[in-house]
Image (tube, rainbow, N blue to C red):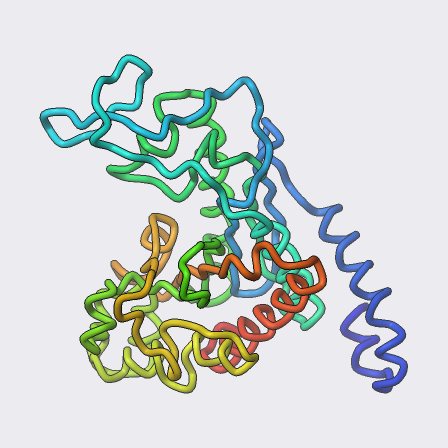
């Protein structure tokens, strides 16, 4: 019904309808949301070839899960132990979350839906002090620290992500895009887009497609999926995500205007980006979006403005690159 209305009304009438339409979108979104049994993980199913993940924006600290420890000790085989009796401090865990990123991801979902691209959204409502969904494989112990209740919520988060990814693959001929939304406090005050390429690679102008989480996208655009040139245009070219977001006035790395972080802070992507992207094959891509602290702690109006621009960037990137 919403799309039919948007097709027939004039611009003047659209301005009047938009707030009503957006409220309707939010109401429908809430009605269709799914939750894990513990009430900590929210899954809002979508219909577009896009998945939004917000793992570090939760605030709930239930007392039935132990607080994670900031320090642990390394065992002889190189693993980390996080139990209370562990001596030493050779292993360290990040406990602070990314304030307001869950709300930003939700607003991005709503703006994309208003634009005709309803994404899937998985949002963690549990504080990072209790559980970290962006750890896995060899770092899983850091994320749950031997707490079975934390492991249960962790499994719920990734279970919902897999549901969303599988749904996108079925409906979008195997291709899709996951954006893992985070926040960071680097003093450069830039938004960081992580494709799993290391800072040293970006600084030296190396863009090997087979080392990125958008390998599927690069492969579709080139006969040689390992072509450094074809990977380059999607990372710092005019069609890159960073350059599109930069066009709204935000400083973004990597992008055409800031191709490399040089000595500045930069996160290349974590477990979720690695686990669900196309690094090891397929056409389901991923990237990590690290929002600046200036946006995270800005007024609600400024956060909403950024959310609208981020949604517009995602929509444009999706349409230009075959995700819509």
The quadrant of the image that shows the N terminus is bottom right
Residue 169 visible in rendering? no
Residue lying furthest left in this view? 76
Q: Would you place residue 294 above or below residue 35 in this image?
A: below
Residue at (41, 79) in percent of width and height: 240
Residue at (10, 28) in percent of width and height: 77
Residue at (59, 54) in percent of width and height: 297
Of residue 65 and residue 84, the one placed in the foreground of this image is 84
Q: Would you place residue 87 above or below residue 280 in this image?
A: above
Residue 238 in picture, x, y percent from top left? 41, 86
Residue 125 in picture, x, y percent from top left? 58, 38
Q: Quadrant of residue 222?
A: bottom left
Left or right: 30 with respect to 79? right
Q: Quadrant of residue 286?
A: bottom left
Residue 116 visible in rendering? yes
Residue at (32, 54) in percent of width and height: 274
Of residue 104 and residue 188, the one placed in the foreground of this image is 188
Residue 146 in picture, x, y percent from top left? 35, 22
The quadrant of the image that shows the C terminus is bottom right
Residue 287 in picture, x, y percent from top left? 40, 62
Of residue 229 and residue 80, the one placed in the foreground of this image is 80
Left or right: 240 with respect to 85? right
Residue lying furthest top in this view? 85
Residue lying furthest front in this view? 187
Left or right: 76 with respect to 34? left
Question: How many badges with numbers are in the image?
Answer: 0
């Amino acid at each position: 019904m919403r799309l039919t209305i948007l097709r027939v009304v004039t611009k003047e009438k659209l301005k009047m309808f938009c707030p009503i339409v957006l409220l309707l979108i939010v109401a429908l979104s809430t009605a269709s949301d799914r939750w894990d049994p513990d009430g900590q993980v929210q899954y809002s199913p979508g219909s577009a070839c896009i998945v939004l993940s917000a793992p570090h924006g939760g605030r709930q600290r239930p007392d039935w899960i132990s607080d994670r420890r900031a320090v642990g000790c390394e065992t002889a085989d190189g693993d980390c132990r996080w139990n209370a009796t562990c001596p030493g401090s050779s292993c360290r865990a990040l406990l602070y979350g990314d304030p307001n990123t869950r709300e930003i991801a939700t607003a991005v979902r709503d703006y994309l839906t208003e634009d005709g691209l309803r994404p899937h959204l998985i949002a963690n409502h549990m504080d990072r002090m209790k559980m970290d969904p962006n750890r896995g494989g060899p770092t899983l112990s850091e994320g749950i620290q031997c707490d079975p209740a934390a492991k249960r919520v962790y499994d719920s988060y990734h279970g919902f992500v897999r549901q969303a990814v599988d749904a996108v693959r079925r409906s979008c001929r195997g291709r899709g895009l996951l954006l893992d939304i985070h926040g960071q406090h680097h003093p450069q005050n830039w938004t960081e887009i992580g494709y799993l390429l290391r800072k040293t690679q970006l600084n030296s102008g190396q863009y090997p497609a087979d080392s990125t989480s958008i390998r599927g996208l690069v492969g579709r655009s080139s006969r040689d999926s390992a072509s450094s040139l074809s990977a380059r245009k999607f990372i710092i070219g005019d069609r890159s995500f960073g350059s599109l977001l930069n066009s709204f006035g935000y400083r973004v790395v990597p992008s055409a205007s800031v191709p490399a972080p040089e000595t500045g802070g930069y996160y290349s992507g974590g477990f979720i980006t690695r686990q669900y992207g196309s690094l090891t094959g397929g056409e389901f891509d991923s990237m990590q979006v690290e929002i600046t602290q200036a946006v995270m702690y800005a007024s609600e109006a400024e956060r909403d403005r950024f959310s609208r621009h981020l949604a517009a960037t995602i929509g444009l990137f999706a349409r230009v690159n075959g995700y819509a």
